[in-house]
Image (cartoon, rainbow, N blue to C red):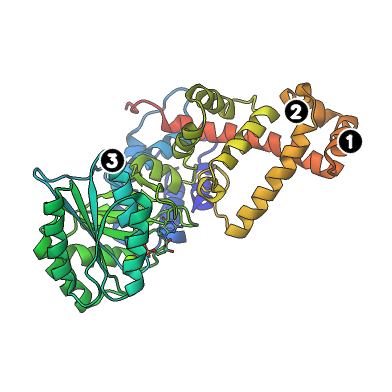
């Protein structure tokens, strides 16, 4: 997807302004990019057509702004339009006026419903709400055990009634129990099937009738293929959903699924799952997702995660550094260590610009190479760390670093080259992002 969009921007390099004529080719690239890659199936042709139409109209209406390249303008228009397509703003969970708020989770098998149930309980608990979980998947005893274990892990009670009781009956009993306990929120996990079938829908309808839930959230795997748009539509028509949760965004997918949910159901994505840990649940930010889909990297989320482990000041300093041309080996070391401290590399790496798809094997490889890098940077003098040019210019210095760190001269050369590449990449990224952070474009 990214390369398709890059082609679109590139075609505008050297142009003075956006015209009806010169956006024809880039818009074709954008249309193709949206329909191809992992977005395919999530976005129907009419949706893309409407999208391209809207972007084209705005692009031609926009006047030339001094200091802004036409391709940057187009990036901003595309981004804003994507944000709009995904609902614009963050959609908060709705809570009932009187206790308890009931949240029903639905979705196909394996998408992450049970995991999300516990994550959501954990998330709400941190906001000071008392929660209770209800194990409504009666088809596999293991599903109940799984929820019980996760409930223990996050310190939230789980209501179970075994596998012999009908789901609607369990829901009813669970709700009574929640009322007795006077909890703020009761979250009901349900069974999924590999495919939509009538039995599942009927069962969910029964459960919904009994619960009268405040929220009915459809859990969607970000990796879902062609059938995603149809899936969301069917659940919405059959059960009536109030929103969706997109899971497994830490994986290879760029999250194209996000584009169609709102468009086909009129209901927003409220939360996203970014990993297997209980903490990996966040609100859904349409603007950040637009950045991710455009392949600019989820810089905002990245910085936010970094802030959790770094001092606020430190993070701001780092952000400035990353985005300036002075990014040196000290920053490099600090950044890689921060990333390491963040725990799972894989969660973060997808957010770093220029590091799109990555497999677990590549993650292990990356962790290994971080260690090697650290050794080399530690063997540099403070001056060399601040002025990488010194190493770029002097084979003698590189040789010394290689010897002191026990690495080869070639490895040292590679590291130096990498730092300069990173500067260039950051600079390019900033060019694109500046286009995106401009005040509203005037005519
Ligand atoms: P359910 O059948 O819908 O209840 O799905 P589960 O909650 O049992 O999840 C299926 C698998 O997906 C489990 O191995 C989970 O650990 C995993 N999983 C769930 N959410 C995420 C996520 O956000 N990221 C990743 N990487 N894995 C997830
Ligand atoms: Mg389950």
Picture coordinates of residue 200, whole percent (x, y): 22, 74
Q: Secondary structure at mark 1?
A: helix
The label shown at residue 388 is 2
Label 1 to label 3, Cα distance in Å?
52 Å
Badge 2, how many Cα within 10 Å: few under 14, some, many 20+?
Answer: some
Badge 1, how many Cα within 10 Å: few under 14, some, many 20+?
Answer: some
Q: Secondary structure at mark 3?
A: loop
Q: Quadrant of residue 331?
A: top right
Quarter placement of the C terminus: top left
How many marks the image carries: the answer is: 3
Mark earlier in primary sequence (1, 3) = 3
**Residue that label 1 marks:** 399
Mark earlier in primary sequence (2, 3) = 3
- The answer to whether any part of residue 29 appears in the image is yes
Badge 3, how many Cα within 10 Å: few under 14, some, many 20+?
Answer: some
Picture coordinates of residue 196, whole percent (x, y): 27, 74
**Residue that label 3 marks:** 90
Compared to 191, does 68 lie above or below?
above
Q: Measuring 37% from the left and 60% from the top, which residue is drawn there? A: 149
Q: Measuring 47% from the left and 31% from the top, which residue is drawn there? A: 307
- Residue 191 or residue 36, whichever sits in front: 191
Mark earlier in primary sequence (2, 1) = 2
Mark in front: 2 vs 1: 1
- Residue 354 or residue 246, whichever sits in front: 246
Q: Quadrant of residue 265?
A: bottom left
- Farthest residue, direction right: 396
Q: Is label 2 within 8 A of ligand 1 (CB to nearest ligand atom)? A: no
Relative placement, left or right, of 204 versus 82 is: left
């Amino acid at each position: 997807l990214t390369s398709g969009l890059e082609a679109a921007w590139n075609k505008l390099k050297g142009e003075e302004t956006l015209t009806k004529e010169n956006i024809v080719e880039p818009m074709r690239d954008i249309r193709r990019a949206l329909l191809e890659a992992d977005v395919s199936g999530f976005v129907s042709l009419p949706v893309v057509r409407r999208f391209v139409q809207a972007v084209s109209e705005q692009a031609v209406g926009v006047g030339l702004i001094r200091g802004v390249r036409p391709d940057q303008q187009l990036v901003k228009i595309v981004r804003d339009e994507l944000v709009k397509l995904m609902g614009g703003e963050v959609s908060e969970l709705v809570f009932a006026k009187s206790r308890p708020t009931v949240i029903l989770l639905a979705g196909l098998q394996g998408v992450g419903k049970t995991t999300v149930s516990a994550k959501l309980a954990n998330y709400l608990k941190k906001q000071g709400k008392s929660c209770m979980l209800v194990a409504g998947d009666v088809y596999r005893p293991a599903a109940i055990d799984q929820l019980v274990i996760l409930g223990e892990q996050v310190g939230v009670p789980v209501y179970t009634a075994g596998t012999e009781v009908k789901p609607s009956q369990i829901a009813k009993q669970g709700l009574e129990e929640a009322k007795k306990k006077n909890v703020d929120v009761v979250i009901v996990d349900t069974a999924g099937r590999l495919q939509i079938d009538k039995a599942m829908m009927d069962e969910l309808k029964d459960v919904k009738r009994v619960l009268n839930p405040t929220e009915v959230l459809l859990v969607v795997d970000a990796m879902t293929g062609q059938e995603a748009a149809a899936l969301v539509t069917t659940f919405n028509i059959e059960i009536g959903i109030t929103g969706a949760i997109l899971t497994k965004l830490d994986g290879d997918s760029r999250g194209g699924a996000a584009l169609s949910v709102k468009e086909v159901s009129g209901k927003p994505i409220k939360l996203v799952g970014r990993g297997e840990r209980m903490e990996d649940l966040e609100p859904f930010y349409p603007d950040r997702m637009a950045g991710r889909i455009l392949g600019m990297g989820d810089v905002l989320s990245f910085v936010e995660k970094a802030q959790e482990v770094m001092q606020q000041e430190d993070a701001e300093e780092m952000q400035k550094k990353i985005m300036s041309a002075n990014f040196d080996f000290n920053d490099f070391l600090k950044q890689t260590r921060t990333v390491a401290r963040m725990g799972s590399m894989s969660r973060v790496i997808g957010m770093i610009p220029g590091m799109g798809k990555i497999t677990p094997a590549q993650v292990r490889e990356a962790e290994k190479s971080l260690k090697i890098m650290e050794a080399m940077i530690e063997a540099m003098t403070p001056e060399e760390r601040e002025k990488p040019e010194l190493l770029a210019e002097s084979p003698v210095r590189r040789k010394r670093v290689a010897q002191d760190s026990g690495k080869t001269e070639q490895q040292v050369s590679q590291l130096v080259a990498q730092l300069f590449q990173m500067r260039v990449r950051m600079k390019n990224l900033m060019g694109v992002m500046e286009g995106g952070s401009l005040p509203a474009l005037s005519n």
